[in-house]
Image: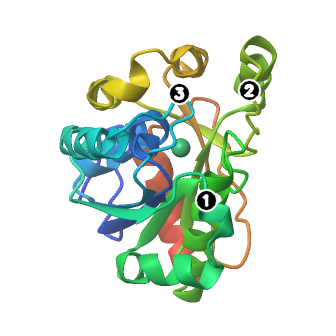
Amino acid sequence: MVLSSDDSVSFDDLATLGVVVAHPDDESFGLGAVLAALAAAGAGVRVVCFTQGEASTLGPSVGLDLVRRDELHAAADVLGLSRMRLASYRDGGLGDVSPALLDREIEADIAGASLVVVFEPSGVTGHVDHRAATAAAERVAAQHGLPVLEWGVTPHVAAALNVEMGTCFVPLDGVDVAVDRSAQLAAIACHESQARDNPVLIRRLQLQGALERVRFREPAALKAEPRVDTPLGILGWLAWSFPKTRSLI
Ligand SMILES: [Zn+2]
C-alpha cells in the first residue's frame, strides 16, 4: 500500500488492527478519527467493546444497552470498521473483573493483529473501565509481541477541560498527528443518546482542532517518538514509526 504522495512510503505491514475499548462510543468519540483514517487506508479494523454502556455517565435508563448497541453498530459502519464485537461486562465494573478473564475475552481478537489500538493507560478521562480495557489489551499485546498505539489528549487540552468543565482528563506525552474529522463526526452523530447533550465532547473536539495526540509503544519499552515540525497525518506518522519498530523486535 502506498500512502499519499506527500508521505510516499509503503505501509505493507499494517494489515489488521486489534482495537479494545470499554464503552460504545469510545471507538467514535475517542478513536474515531484515527480508526477512520486507518480503515480508509485499507487496514482491517477489528474492535472489541467490553461493556454495553448501560451505566452512561450522562444518565442510565431502561433499555439503554440496546439503544447503545444499535448506535455502536451504526457508527462502526460509518467508520469503515471491519468487525465489531460487543461483550457484556457490567458498565462501570471492569475494574472488578479479574485481569485473567479480561485477557481471555480479547485474546482471540488481538492474537492475529499487527497493531493494537487503545486509550492511553490512565484511561484519558480516568474512567476505571477505560483503564481496565487498556491494561488488558496491553497485557495481551505484550504476550504476542505486538506494538500498541495509544490515544489521548495533550496537556493543553486536558488542562483546559479540567478547568472549564471540572473533568479529570489525564494528558498523554506523545506526538500530534493531523486528522480529518469528517467520518468521526458522522460516527459521533450515530451515538445520539450520548452525543445529544455532551458539552465536554464538543469542547474537547474544539480544543483538539485537526490534531490527535498519540503514542506508539513497543511491547517491552517505550519507543522514542518521531519529532516533526509539521504534524504528519496518522498514516504518515505510523508509516514512519511502524516498520522501523517492527524491525527491531
Ligand atoms: Zn468510555
- Counting from the top left corner in percent of width and height, residue 234 is at 45, 43
Occupied quadrant, residue 78: top left
Q: Which residue occupies 58% across, 22% down? A: 208
Q: Secondary structure at mark 1?
A: loop
Residue type at the position of mark 2: Thr
User: Cα distance, mark 1 to mark 2?
Assistant: 20 Å
Q: Earlier in the sequence, mark 3 or mark 1?
A: 3
Q: Which residue occupies 55% across, 34% down? A: 212
Q: Residue furthest front?
A: 62
In this rendered view, identify the residue nearer to me: 139 or 57: 57
Q: Earlier in the sequence, mark 2 or mark 3?
A: 3
Residue type at the position of mark 3: Leu
- Counting from the top left corner in percent of width and height, residue 211 is at 53, 28
* Quadrant occupied by the N terminus: bottom left
Residue type at the position of mark 1: Gly
**Mark 1 residue CB less than 8 A from any atom of ligand 1:** no
Occupied quadrant, residue 74: top left
Q: Secondary structure at mark 3?
A: loop
Q: Which residue occupies 62% across, 72% down? A: 97
The residue to which callout 2 is attached is 167
Mark 3 surroundings within 10 Å by alpha-carbon count, few (fewer than 14), some (14 through 19), many (20 or more): few
The residue to which callout 3 is attached is 58
Identify the disc placed on residue 80: none
Image: 195 above or below 220: above
- Counting from the top left corner in percent of width and height, residue 247 is at 53, 79
Discs 1/2, front: 1
In this rendered view, identify the residue nearer to me: 141 or 50: 50
- In the rendered structure, the answer to whether residue 189 lies left or right of residue 28 reads left
Q: Which residue occupies 40% across, 36% down? A: 33
User: Cα distance, mark 2 to mark 3?
Assistant: 13 Å
- Counting from the top left corner in percent of width and height, residue 143 is at 58, 88
Q: Are marks 3 and 1 in contact (CB under 8 Å)?
A: no
